[in-house]
Image (cartoon, helix red, strand yellow):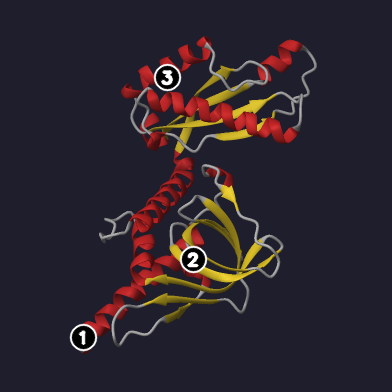
Amino acid sequence: MESRHAKRISVLGISLSLVLVMGLLLPASSYSQFQPGQKRTVKDGEKLKIKGAILNRDGELFVVRDVTRTDTVVALTDKTKIKVERKGLFHRDKRMDATVLIPGLILEVEGKGAGGRLVADEIEFTEADLKSAITAYAQTAPLKQKLSESEQKLADTSKEVVDTNKRIDEIDQYELVKVVTVPFAANSATLTDKAKTQLDEIASNAPNAKNYLIEVKGYTDVTGEASKNLDLSLSRADAVMQYLAVKNIPPRRMTIPMGYGESKSGATTPAGREAENRVDVRILVNKGLSK
């Protein structure tokens, strides 16, 4: 019994060492890299308990997405208790430090609202979910477990987070080989016939390429409200991505579509403003294969 217990502690110790390394090496991924969810504003003093997966973390703040794709900004303090739930009659919950809070980890957060955020009093997760998050980042086989419908949704969200962060982390391994500019009519996110022709060409050439990645970036001209332009640019980028997906470009080959709003070029002529209403499709290839 003693050797089995010691072995279990040793395995968890190795896992925690991996977490510490990951905490130092993982990029500070932008929240905007993920498909937008509904943002929760927590009222000052409101008590709240949520369960979800960590989207990203920036120091003492991290974003948790629940099964309804509602995103909550969580704030850590010196008083926040972080613990892992350990199953078994003789296993007590173990206190942890904030280094274990990595993207993809499924957890429960309980606390109170302040400034729209949830200030965490207590954070809890299972030993299995911690190991799953570590395993996913270590790129080994994920742990298999029977999940309820809500747990499966959280697991799917966790996988989306991990995969996205990996793509962000690996982007420096690629170099730009081509940019295709897809035009849009003013105030519209509808693909034109010319745009579809350009995207059809990209899709037809894709099967011949290896280890490629596609970035989709949307823009608008400076006319109109900035907030509406940001939404329009994202809608344009999303329209391009959806079209490419229908044309059998695997989603794993595309980063999350991004909208950048106004291009800020300051074009004053009709032709100049027309050029700003566009989506740039950037095709990247692994550096090792392009040499």
What residue is drawn where x is 70% and y is 28%?
Answer: 263
Q: Where is residue 224 in the image (x, y as percent from the top left)?
A: 76, 26
Q: Where is residue 110 in the image (x, y as percent from the top left)?
A: 55, 71
Question: Can residue 3 be spotted in the picture?
Answer: yes
Q: What element carries label 2?
A: loop
Dot 1 alpha-carbon crowd within 10 angstroms: few under 14, some 14 to 19, many 20 or more: few
Compared with 20, 281 (above or below) is: above
What residue is drawn where x is 74% and y is 33%?
Answer: 226
Compared with 280, 96 (above or below) is: below
The quadrant the N terminus occupies is bottom left
Q: Which mark is residue 272?
A: none
Q: Residue 202 carries which label?
A: 3
Look at mark 1 in the image and give the residue it sits on.
3
Q: Where is residue 248 in the image (x, y as percent from the top left)?
A: 35, 25
**Amino acid type at mark 3:** Ile
Look at mark 2 in the image and give the residue it sits on.
101
Dot 3 alpha-carbon crowd within 10 angstroms: few under 14, some 14 to 19, many 20 or more: some
- In the figure, residue 258 lies in which quadrant? top right
- In the figure, residue 59 lies in which quadrant? bottom right
